[in-house]
Image: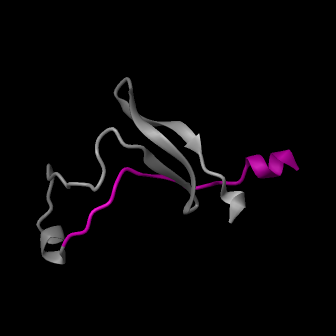
């Protein structure tokens, strides 16, 4: 059974912050544009698996790559 579960693909996404903007402003975005988010640079980000929140984390640099260090797991079983 473990082999079957280990081969299931899961989409992982990380949300650093959110913002709202008009379609007019969205259409003006180009290469090099900076979008202000509703979170500060030291706040935790959300980590999702298949659209469900599973953890909070901190953005880290590993060499030249960007990663996320998990700081807190979310208990989804309490719903």
Query: Residue 38 appears in which quarter of the rendering?
Result: bottom left
Residue 71 position within the rendered picture, expressed as x and y whole percent measured from the top left? 53, 37
Q: Relative to 18, is 41 above or below?
A: above
Image point 43% across, 38% down: which residue?
Answer: 58
Q: Name the side, left or right, on which 62 lies relative to 37.
A: right
**x%, y% of residue 46?**
47, 51
Residue drawn at (11%, 66%) of the image: 28
Task: Answer with left or right where residue 71 lies relative to residue 64.
Answer: right
Quadrant of the image containing the C terminus: bottom right
Identity of the residue drawn at 37% across and 43% down: 43
Q: Is residue 39 above or below residue 19?
A: above
> How was this image coloured?
one colour
Image position, residue 18 (x, y; %): 32, 60
Residue situated furthest front in the rendering:
78
**Residue most toward the top?**
63
Q: Residue furthest bottom?
A: 23
Q: Is residue 49 magenta?
A: no
Give the side of residue 47 with respect to residue 61, left or right. Answer: right
User: Residue 1 or 71: which is nearer the viewer?
Assistant: 71
Q: Is residue 13 magenta?
A: yes
Where residue 45 sits: x, y (%)? 42, 47
Residue segment shown in magenta: 1-21
């Amino acid at each position: 059974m473990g082999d079957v579960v280990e081969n299931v693909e899961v989409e992982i996404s990380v949300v650093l912050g959110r913002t709202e903007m008009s379609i007019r402003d969205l259409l003006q975005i180009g290469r090099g544009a900076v979008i202000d988010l509703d979170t500060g640079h030291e706040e935790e980000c959300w980590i999702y698996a298949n659209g469900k929140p599973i953890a909070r984390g901190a953005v880290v640099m590993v060499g030249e790559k960007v990663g996320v260090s998990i700081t807190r797991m979310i208990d989804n079983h309490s719903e």
